[in-house]
Image (cartoon, helix red, strand yellow):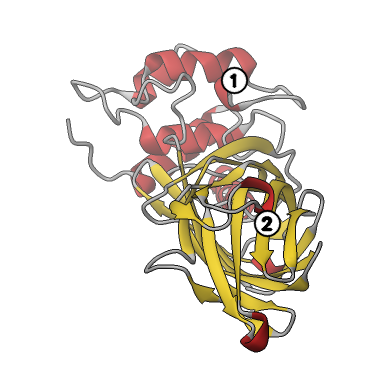
Amino acid sequence: MRRWHRFFVFLGAVSALLGSNVSQAGRNVTWTLNPSASSISVSGAVEGYPLEQQAAGSMTTTYSGPMNTVVSGPFHTAALPNALQFSSASVDAAVNGTWQPGIGGVSGSAPGDYGVKANMGLFGTLYAAMRDFMLNLTSSQLAVSGGGFNSSLIDATVLQGYADYRSILGSARDDLAGEIVANSATAGLIALNGTTATLTVPVDATLPISGGFTGTIRLQGTLVGTTAVLVAGDTNGDGDVDLADLGSLAGAYGTPSGAVWSSGDFDDDGDVDLVDLGALAGNYGIGTPAPLNFAGDLANYDLVPEPATLLVIVIGGWLAPSRKK
């Protein structure tokens, strides 16, 4: 009775550990923007006159490029991270047409990312085009809860870009590089769908204009990026959890710090321990052509005392009651 009492105490302790949030080392994750889902529209005013479109669709364009982040906490097909930090990005606006004025504000037109105009009354019509526009995104570590995070804490800086203007009052080119764009949209989201994770960043920001003309440009829209995520236990990223993965974890089992996913650290806490072994057990046999015997394969490795071995098998049964080919 005493032996089983100790086992159940051990079971409760490890179960609590599996459900806890521990300090995480973090790992780099790159999200690739989906242009069909990522677009930003502009509005605003120049010299107090509201901006209008030069033609249908000229004030909206799509975006592509990478968003680089560091995620902390478990992040795989069954778990969202508990923190996210934007380290860099190259959020690149697409050319959406040919707009007035020409490059540098000269007469004529040229390809641009946005094309706007403003009716300035007695001063005629001002034409403006934004070109070569690209944003960088950075942040401190942002808490993630239920997939949600506060996107207003992301700092957007113009990596490159120009605003070309022309009216009867003159012409100008405003170099936008280095301008800091404060985002007020808050409802950022990370979501899982099988082996794909989606990062949604809402945008509502104001960009100052301070060249030959003054004013503001409001940017509103959504950036949506995706990244591939692995099944916990798939150390080599081949889509299954099998004996090779168990061998990788076994070779690193007990590593106290500095461990990575490929060595069996599935919760990103830097070590390889019973929690990681339990995660692998829960998915053992996924993607394999025939069922695998976790208990039998685990017996080839002297990793844990027998009560803990039983616990891992029990956890595996709870997490994965059936396996499909």
Q: Is residue 259 left or right of residue 299?
A: right
**Residue shown at 42%/36% (left/top)?**
231
- Is disc 1 placed on a helix, strand or loop? helix
Q: Earlier in the sequence, mark 1 or mark 2?
A: 2
Q: Is residue 190 above or below residue 123?
A: above
Q: Nearer the viewer, residue 159 or 165?
A: 165
Q: Residue furthest bottom?
A: 121
Residue designated by label 2: 163
The mark closer to the camera, 1 or 2, is: 2
Q: Do the CB atoms of the residues marked 1 and 2 lie less than 8 Å apart?
A: no
**Residue shown at 46%/18% (left/top)?**
236
Residue 30 is situated, as x and y percent measured from the top left of the image, at 57, 37
Quarter holding residue 88: top right
**Residue shown at 53%/46% (left/top)?**
4
Q: Is residue 281 above or below residue 107?
A: above
Residue 64 is situated, as x and y percent measured from the top left of the image, at 49, 44
Q: Is residue 299 visible?
A: no
**Disc 1 from disc 2: Cα separation:** 50 Å
**Residue shown at 63%/73% (left/top)?**
185
- Is disc 2 placed on a helix, strand or loop? strand
Q: Nearer the viewer, residue 161 or 122?
A: 122
Q: Is residue 161 left or right of residue 203?
A: right
Residue designated by label 1: 263
The image quadrant where one finds the C terminus is top left
Q: Nearer the viewer, residue 53 or 67?
A: 53
Residue 279 is situated, as x and y percent measured from the top left of the image, at 48, 38
The three-letter code of the residue at mark 2 reads Ala
Q: Is residue 324 left or right of residue 273?
A: left
Residue 304 is situated, as x and y percent measured from the top left of the image, at 58, 25
The three-letter code of the residue at mark 1 reads Ser
| Label 1: few (<14), some (14–19) or many (≥20) C-alpha neighbours in 10 Å | many
